[in-house]
Amino acid sequence: MYSTAEFRRGLKVEIDGKPFIIVEFQHVKPGKGGAFVRTKLKNLETGAVLDKTFRSGEKVGKPSLEETEMQYLYKDDDGFHFMDTETYEQVFLSHDQVGDSADFLVDELILTVLYHDKKPISIELPTFVEMSVEKTDPGVKGDTATGGSKPITLSSGLVVQAPLFIEEGDIVKIDTRSGEYVERVSR
């Protein structure tokens, strides 16, 4: 069981038998009455977001989640396919279960698949992924009116802002939490 004092972003909790992750939380101490915690929770099975308020000191359950290291294989019309790196068993997740994480999936990426009651429900990406630059305009020397950055299109179709020196074919490191360019990777 977790107390509201232990709440933090990214904490996985169970409410009414369903697994949730805390997206946002705020401790509130009104001048009159007891303190409470206002939260925004994302259902790990459906992706639905729920606003819920807890009294200070209230307890919530720990979900029975299993994490398995897997490798991303491929995408088809129905969804995404992953393979267990130890047993070579393949798992399928739908577009809804993967959600916005699909923008960061590259071939052979090692990530974590979350299971609830022995069913795969979602994925957790590594903090950084390396992706190739598929398309970008050439940077013009002296063109720094936009702060020295330009849009680049990555292998997954994701478009991010990057410095002017980035060219097509470069490999760049992207932060999966914010979707921002981190650095160019030298190979």
Image (cartoon, rainbow, N blue to C red):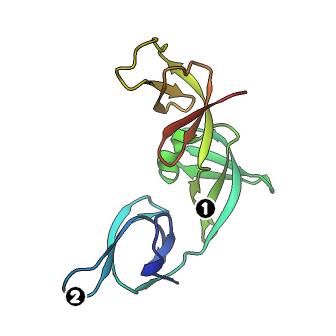
Which residue is outermost to the left?
32
Q: Residue 38 at what x, y percent from top left?
A: 32, 72
Q: Which residue occupies 35% across, 66% down?
A: 50
Q: Amino acid at mark 2?
A: Gly
Pick whichever, 82 or 107, lies toward us: 107
Q: Residue 71 at what x, y percent from top left?
A: 70, 47
Q: Amino acid at mark 1?
A: Leu
Q: Which residue is mark 2?
A: 33
SS class of the residue under badge 2? loop
Q: Residue 2 at what x, y percent from top left?
A: 50, 81
Q: Which residue is mark 1?
A: 114
Q: Is residue 177 visible?
A: yes
SS class of the residue under badge 1? strand
Disc 2: CA contacts within 10 A as few (<14), some (14-19) or many (>=20)? few
Q: Which residue occupies 63% across, 36% down?
A: 130
Q: Is residue 95 visible?
A: no
State whether residue 144 is above or below residue 140: below
State whether residue 27 is above or below residue 173: below
Say whether disc 2 or disc 1 marks the residue closer to the N-terminus.
2
Q: Is residue 182 left or right of residue 86?
A: left
Q: Which residue occupies 49% across, 76% down?
A: 14
Q: How many marks?
A: 2
Q: Which residue occupies 19% across, 86% down?
A: 32
Q: Is residue 145 left or right of residue 121?
A: left
Looking at the rendered image, the quarter that the C terminus falls into is top right
Q: Residue 179 at what x, y percent from top left?
A: 48, 41
